[in-house]
Image: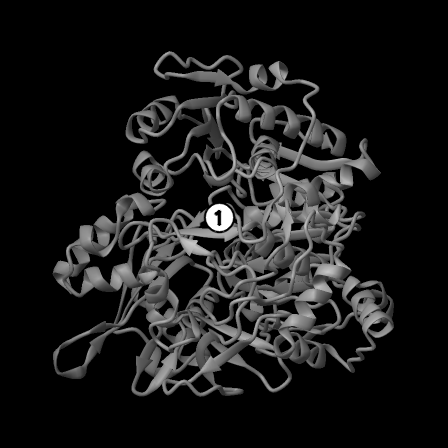
Amino acid sequence: MTETAEGTPLWEPSEEFKDNARISDYMGWLKAEKDLSFGDYNELWEWSVTDLEGFWASIWEYCDIKASKPYEKVRGKRGMRGTEWFPGAELNYAEHVLRHAADRPDGPAVLHQSEGRSLGEVSWGELQERTAALAAGLREMGVGRGDRVAAYLPNVPEAVIALLACASIGAVWSSCSPDFGVGSVVDRMEQIEPKVLIAVDGYRYGGEDYDRIEVVARLQLEIPTLRKTIVLPYLSEVPDTSPLENVVMWDDLLAGHEGAELTFEQVPFDHPLWVLYSSGTTGLPKAIVHSHGGILIEHLKKAVLHIDLGPDDRFFWFTTTGWMMWNLVVAGLLTGSTVLLYDGNPGYPDMNVLWEFAEKTGMTCFGTSASYITACMKADIEPGKDFDLSSLESIGSTGSPLPPEGFEWAYEHVKEDLWLFSTSGGTDMCTAFVGGVPLLPVRAGELQARSLGAKVEAFDEEGNPQIDEVGELVITEPMPSMPIYFWNDEEGERYRESYFDAYPGVWRHGDWIKIKENGACVIYGRSDSTINRGGIRMGTSEIYSAVDKVEEVADSLVVDVPRDGGSSFMPLFVVLQEGVDLDDDLKSRIESSIKENTSPRHVPNEIFAVPEIPKTLNGKKLEVPVKKILSGMPPEEAASKESLSNPESLDRFVELAEKI
């Protein structure tokens, strides 16, 4: 594979592709209905972040949002914190999903597969019927408007049904995936005091079975507000629920309410829809509350205009129910798309499993993470040769910055005519701030543009916006999907500290970004883990990209540890491919790659081999906690082990801290 520099053009949308894009139809609609003309995407974006009322009102109208009570105005109370969106409106998120059931009750709403289930289908009619039955069952348990329902479920259709049932009755949804341990779930769910828990008996991952009945029993003990537990048999057809109390089986509950009429509780625009959580690496996870209306209008904008979804699409993103991308997958249903769910290890039995799934489902959009694309690249697979991907039109990548070689691999080994969009956002707003636009070219290492309605800027240390310079990613105008509040943060102090401490009245997200003159963006990783060596700031993603070029390295983590006198020590930790030793030759090649691809100043002081890189439950590298441990902080203060997918991985860093 040839070396591809950042910014190298890789794909240009054809005129037909652009004409068929839904954003083109939207721009035509703006011209015909609102007498608004824009010469290109950048002009459209500028209008969307300048005339907030006009833009968001147009999304409401264009995406045909239905409200039982109309809104009085687009914004009532103003300000970055606490903007009141669409006051007076009453609506329901689930109603907007299930309106598609009337058009094609027999069409596929969900295609799903897991390590324990072969490919299956849920039609739109079935989705509606099962949602109605579960909603009736929840009501019978005393769940109503504003009550919380906690889910401990994998990425399966039942999770989608449960979310829609909660939303339909105005209850508040919150989920964790079953690979979360007891402490992680309790840290999250206990905060919101749920009435009902919906849980699986276990799950299969990487060919191994994991029983979760004892975990569910612990959850019942440690979350005292639970009145009832609904158990979904997943690992076993007839699970042993004897350790549990107040249990009803999923199938029995739905059968007992078969034929129930589906009604939709009409709630205010800012009524809570769900609670998502921060990673919780250094303290109790933030319980982030999003609204029915804010998520509805933002996800319609995102799915329709930026992912280009419609009724003919089959939309997939590899995720679990513990990551905001799962909520975005459900948003595919808002557009009438068929959503595709896969539960299991994406590398089991080998790295081809998801590409085979793409072929079998006729997938049109393959959403994944940058680390997955890098893993496919290192595994030397060739999906484009081995599978029929004729339906595939786009690949989306998120989770961390996708390096230029990841872009190059997709075009060489997946498909030449492919819209590859890298995207970046956050759980905090449950959307992307920068990402895909089907009208624009794809260039290696770049995110195509800032999202409509998202006034993203790169601030210097004094708070001045800048172009073609790396700065803090900030948002300077409010968005409807901003959290309405954090749970149990009555004064809003934790909310303020999380986003508005650095620049008063401006949302600081915590990423380094460069916004180029043409509107394209590059993300360089978290700003609190950026490495400054000799006055040159470098995002960790750039260093990882350089290290990834060395085939023997499977994963890596780099930090810069301050020392007395203003100096610092920069160690690099590498996980090596099986059977590889970290000898002087390999160290030299790693150092050379960093020197050539980043800067000589960012060559590490020392390189250490470690068995694993510590990661959050959502797969993010723990750079800051590792830095704290190496600075002498006790590990239990640096990171909550319950927030890690591999807590034992920290042990090696504690050992190294003593040496370093």
Q: Quadrant of the C terminus?
A: bottom left
Look at mark 1 in the image and give the residue it sits on.
323
Name the image quarter holding residue 414.
bottom right
The residue that appears at 20% across and 59% down in the rendered structure is 629
Task: Identify the amino acid type marked 1.
Answer: Trp
Residue 212: image x %, image y %? 40, 26
Q: Quadrant of the N terminus?
A: bottom right
Circle 1 sits in a helix, a strand or a loop, which is it?
loop
Residue 354: image x %, image y %? 62, 43
203 up-or-down from 86: above or below? above
Residue 527: image x %, image y %? 38, 72
Residue 588 in sight:
no
**Looking at the image, what colour scheme do you see?**
one colour
Taking the image as shown, residue 72 lies to the left or right of residue 564, namely right
Taking the image as shown, residue 124 lies to the left or right of residue 640, namely right
Residue 77 in sight:
yes
498 up-or-down from 591: above or below? above
Residue 59: image x %, image y %? 71, 63
Q: Residues within 10 Å of mark 1 (few under 14, many from 20)?
A: many
193 up-or-down from 116: above or below? below
User: Foreground residue, 353 or 324?
Assistant: 324
Total of numbered circles in the picture?
A: 1
User: Foreground residue, 385 or 582?
Assistant: 385
The residue that appears at 54% across and 43% down in the rendered structure is 346
Taking the image as shown, residue 32 lies to the left or right of residue 623, namely right
The residue that appears at 46% across and 64% down in the rendered structure is 82
